[in-house]
Image (spheres, helix red, strand yellow):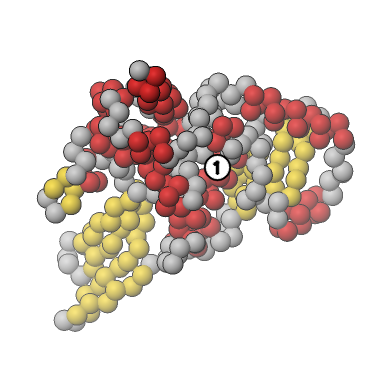
Amino acid sequence: MFFAPEETVLEIRRRGRGFQATETAPAAVRLAIIGVRACDLAAVAIQDRIFLQDLFQDSHYAARRADALLIAVNCTHSAPTCFCASMNTGPQAKTGYDLAMTELDEGFLVRAGSERGASIIAALSLGQATASAVEMEVRAIAECAEHQVRRMDASDLPGLLYDEAENPRWDDVAARCLSCTNCTMVCPTCFCHTVLDVQEIEGNMSRRVRKWDSCFSLEHARVHGFNFRSRIHDRYRQWLTHKLASWIDQFGTSGCTGCGRCVAWCPVGIDLTEEVAAIRGSRGARTAR
């Protein structure tokens, strides 16, 4: 919604014997996103950190993000692939929303998280939530977290992955990984992209286009004719170590929100929670010996 899969960022037109370069900008639209989950809000906060909070802001991301209305829905049931509770990103929306809703048997419990959200509640003339409704909400969200079948032990990350860069588990997962890029395409925090220059056939204009890319793509690591991640082993290790370790060094937060989408969309069933546990376990086995 905010970081477009493909967009033109610059147009270059022929002007006599010279040229003129013009930055493009997305059209200003009022955007409302309904049904945002807690893991999605955590991902938006991470993307905001990347695109808005450094020395240079991304004007395209900022334009789409500026007036977005985010209506969150707290989770009372988890999918088998969810592990947001262990990443401390869910299942309850805590910050970053305008309105947060929880579905109960008797209706919806609604909270405001911003002045705009409060004005919407005021316009709807909603009644005050009962104590029993609040109690039901707390219990339902707690049960949702408790029943998640996947967990990520992040207690000693990033140190674990840095120390285990040569762990044989990387060979094991590389033998199964197809390098298909599915995990990075559905991850709500991945932001790798490539830049292409697209020229019109008559040669009077070219467009500079930014489009999503993936660190799993073979060409992503090609620099001046040399590919420094030619093996799937290298690419999977880069992705997982960046997501769970060096991302923390770069941005002060993990790049994983526990949404489980990478697990759900992997065609061969690779599960990053299992991979981290296996690496941890093999280190423990070596220490015990």
**At x 42% / y 47%, what residue is drawn?**
247
- In the foreground, 49 or 119: 49
Of residues 25 and 204, the one nearer the viewer is: 25
Residue farthest along the left direction in this orientation? 225
Please tell me which residue lies in front, 282 or 133: 282
Task: Name the residue carrying label 1.
Answer: 40
Number of residue marks:
1
130 to 50, vertically: above or below = above
Residue 72 % position (x, y): 64, 43
Which x, y percent locates residue 211? 33, 51
Q: Residue at x 42, y 66 (%)?
A: 56
Q: Would you say 61 lies left or right of 173 here? A: right
Residue type beneath disc 1 = Asp
Residue 171 appears left or right of 35: left
SS for callout 1: helix
Residue 59 seen in this snapshot? no
Q: Position of residue 99 (x, y in %)?
A: 70, 48
User: Which quadrant is the C terminus positioned in?
Assistant: top left
Residue 47 at x, y percent in the picture: 48, 52
Q: In the rendered view, would you say 250 is above or below 13?
A: above
Q: Label 1: how many residues lie within 10 Å, few (<14), some (14-19) or many (20+)?
A: many
Q: Could you tell me if residue 95 is visible in this image? A: yes
Q: Residue at x 27, y 32 (%)?
A: 166
Q: Residue at (52%, 45%) from the top-left corner?
A: 43
Residue 123: quadrant of the picture = bottom right
